[in-house]
Amino acid sequence: MSPGHKRQMVERLVIAGRCSGRAACRHFGLHRSTFSYEAKEPDAWLARLKATLRRLSNQHAELGYAKITCFLKEEGWKVGTRMVQRLRRELGLAVPAKKPRRRRQGVSTGLPTKASHRNHVWTWDFVHDTTVRGGTLRMLNVMDEYTRECLCIHVERRINARKVRQVMARLIEEHGAPEHIRSDNGSEFIERGLREWLAENKIRTLYIAPGSPWQNGYIEPSGAR
C-alpha cells in the first residue's frame, strides 16, 4: 500500500471518529508528518520561471532544453537541466522532430533493364575491409551482369571518383564499353565529372533507389540472390 493510500485510510478513520490520528498512523505505519502534509500552491517564483521559459522557448524554437537552460542561467535563474526539461514537457514546449536528411541520388540516363548479352549491363560497387594492423582497404568491384564475370577488383587505401574513372577507362580498353552501368548512389558514382565522362562514352547510368540493395543484387554485399 502506498503512502497516499495509507493517508486516505487514516483520514477516513479520523473523520469518522473511530480513533485518533496518532493511533491510526501507528496502525498503518504512516509517519505523522506525511499525514499532516498539505500540498503547496505553486509559488510566484515558479510561475515567473515558467513564463520566462515559455518566452525563451518561443524565441528559440529550434533549441532544446540544454541550450535554454544556459539562457536561463545567463538571466540569473538558478535552475538545472533536468528541471528545465521537466517543465518544458509540462508546458508542451518540445522541439519539433528533425526531418530526415534527403539523400543525394544520381540521375539515371537509362531505364532499368536486364542484361541480355555481353557488355549490355555492367555493375560496380565498393567492398570495405581492414588489414591485420587495423588499416582500411577499399575494393572496387566491376562485374558483367550477363556473363557474371568479375572484370576488376581494384584495391587501394582510398578510391575517389577520379580513380573510378581511371579504372573504368582501363576496362573499356580491355573489354569494350558497356551500354549501361548499374550502381548505388555512392558519392564516387554520382560525381558530376564521372557522369559527364560516362555520357561522353555513351554509357547510360542506372542508379538504384536509396536503401534498395536488392535492385543491384549481383554485386551488393547485402543484396538477396
Image: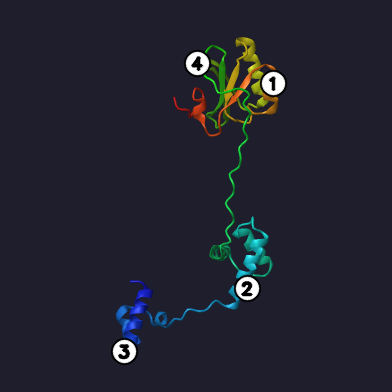
The residue that label 3 is drawn on is 17
Q: Disc 3 marks which amino acid?
A: Gly
For the point 52% across and 25% down, the residue is: 216
Q: What element carries label 4?
A: loop
Residue highlighted by disc 2: 48
Element under label 1? helix
CB within 8 Å, label 1 to label 4 = no
Residue 66 locus on image (x, y percent): 61, 59
- Amino acid type indicated by mark 4: Arg
Query: Does residue 70 show up?
Result: no
Label 3 crowd bin: few (<14), some (14–19), many (20+), radius 10 Å: few
Which comes sooner in the sequence, label 3 or label 2?
Answer: 3
x 66%, y 26%: residue? 161
Question: Which sits earlier in the primary sequence, circle 3 or circle 1?
Answer: 3
Of the numbered discs 2 and 1, the one sitting upstream in the chain is 2
* Left/right of residue 4 with respect to residue 19 in the rendered view: right
Q: Residue 105 carries which label?
A: none
State how many labels appear.
Answer: 4
Mark 4 Cα within 10 Å, few/some/many (few <14, many 20+)?
Answer: some
- Percent from the top left, x then y, of residue 23? 31, 86
**What type is the residue that disc 2 sits on?**
Arg
Q: Mark 4 points at which residue?
A: 148
Q: Which residue is drawn at 61% across and 71% down?
A: 49
Q: Nearer the viewer, residue 48 or 204?
A: 204
Find disc 1 in the rendering and name its residue: 197
Q: State which quarter of the image contains the N terminus.
A: bottom left
Alpha carbons under labels 3 and 1: distance apart: 96 Å
Label 3–label 4 contact, CB within 8 A:
no
Mark 2 secondary-structure assignment:
helix
CB of mark 3 within 8 Å of CB of mark 1? no
Q: Who comes first in sequence, dot 1 or dot 4?
A: 4
Above or below: residue 64 compared with residue 33: above
